[in-house]
């Protein structure tokens, strides 16, 4: 069964460093998302991406965050200058584009980001 | 921000019995609802969804009920199995927007006792 994959599974970085989290979507999916879950808190939406541009973003997704699909396969989330409060599980999700618009999102296993 | 609420952080059920997980929402723009199951160290796994034009959707042992007037939905699992033990998240998305962001509840830890 097709699945969303994410690398790395765990990333440890120093505060102020840049990190890039990678996701390989399910092949026929056209909508891509990033969510995060801080330990003990809810899963929160960060950004959605379609047709090589951001569709929606939350207030969490400020100027230090960016997304791109540089090679047509990987979908990446870059955090330019990490802060302690960026420590969280980051989940990539993808969905098809179906008529009617009600498409379930399939999640990857997540990347645990630890900022020291 | 408590647009989607799961008021029971945990639920224990005997194997073979019914598990009922509840979810309430406040945003009347939500019109598509999903349930996800999550094991530790894994991403959420899609279980079942329901559109606001329906009040029930069934898939095997899983049934989701939607009461729009009460802004309430529930997930029924019958019969419950030990492998169902996991955290269950309710999620909702609005009617507008081409890529629908999901708003999640805080989750309910289901434990099915053998």
Image (spheres, coloured by chain):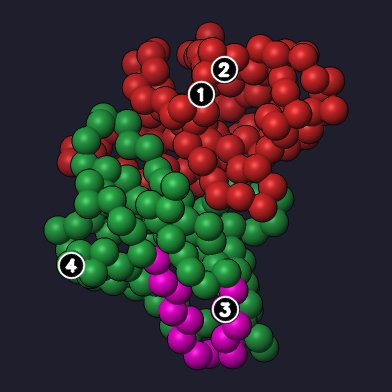
Chain colours: A red, B green
Query: Considering only order in the chain, which callout, 4 or 3, is on the residue closer to the N terminus?
Result: 3
- Please, which chain is the residue tagged with disc 3 on? B
Task: Say whether residue B43 is left or right of residue B54.
Answer: right
Residue at image location 52% in from the left, 53% down from the top = B45
- Pointer 2: what residue? A65
Q: Report in which chain the residue with disc 1 lies.
A: A
- The magenta-colored residue range is B10-23
Q: Nearer the viewer, residue B112 or B74?
A: B74
Residue located beneath label 1 in the image: A61
Q: Chain of mark 4?
A: B
Q: Residue at x 53, y 90 (%)?
A: B16
* Picture coordinates of residue B101, whole percent (x, y): 38, 37
> Disc 2 to disc 1, how far (Cα)?
6 Å
Q: Are marks 4 and 2 in contact (CB under 8 Å)?
A: no
User: Dot 1, how many residues are within 10 Å of its Cα: few (below 14), some (14-19), or many (20+)?
Assistant: some
Q: Which mark is residue A70?
A: none
Q: Position of residue B56 (x, y in %)?
A: 24, 70
Q: CA distance from mark 1 to mark 4?
A: 33 Å
Toward the viewer: B68 or A30?
B68
The reply to whether the magenta stretch includes residue B21 is: yes
Label 2: element kind:
strand
In the rendered structure, the answer to whether residue A23 lies left or right of residue A47 reads right
Q: Which mark is residue B69?
A: 4
Above/below status of A33 relative to B93:
above
**Are discs 4 and 2 both within one chain?**
no
- Tally the numbered discs: 4
Dot 4 alpha-carbon crowd within 10 angstroms: few under 14, some 14 to 19, many 20 or more:
few
Q: Secondary structure at mark 4?
A: loop
**Residue A6 visible (yes or no):** yes
Which of labels 3 and 1 is toward the front? 1
Q: Residue B79: where, in percent of width, then height?
A: 47, 85
- Marks 4 and 2 sit apart, C-alpha to C-alpha, by 39 Å
């Amino acid at each position: 069964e097709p699945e969303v994959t994410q690398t790395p599974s765990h990333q440890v970085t120093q505060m102020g460093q840049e990190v890039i989290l990678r996701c390989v979507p399910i092949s026929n999916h056209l909508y891509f998302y990033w969510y995060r879950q801080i330990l003990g808190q809810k899963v929160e939406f960060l950004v959605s991406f379609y047709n090589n541009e951001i569709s929606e973003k939350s207030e969490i997704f400020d100027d230090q965050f960016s997304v791109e699909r540089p090679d047509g396969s990987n979908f990446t989330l870059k955090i330019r200058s990490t802060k302690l409060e960026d420590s969280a599980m980051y989940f990539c999700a993808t969905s098809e584009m179906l008529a009617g618009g009600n498409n379930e999102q399939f999640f990857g296993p997540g990347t645990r980001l630890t900022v020291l | 921000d408590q647009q989607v609420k799961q008021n029971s952080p945990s639920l224990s059920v005997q194997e073979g019995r019914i598990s009922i997980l509840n979810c309430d929402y406040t945003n009347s723009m939500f019109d598509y609802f999903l349930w996800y199951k999550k094991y530790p160290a894994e991403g959420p796994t899609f279980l079942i969804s329901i559109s606001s034009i329906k009040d029930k959707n069934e898939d095997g042992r899983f049934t989701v009920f939607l009461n729009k007037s009460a802004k309430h939905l529930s997930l029924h699992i019958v019969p419950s199995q030990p492998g169902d033990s996991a955290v269950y998240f309710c999620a909702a998305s609005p009617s507008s927007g081409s890529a629908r962001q999901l708003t999640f509840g805080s989750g309910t830890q289901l434990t099915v006792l053998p």
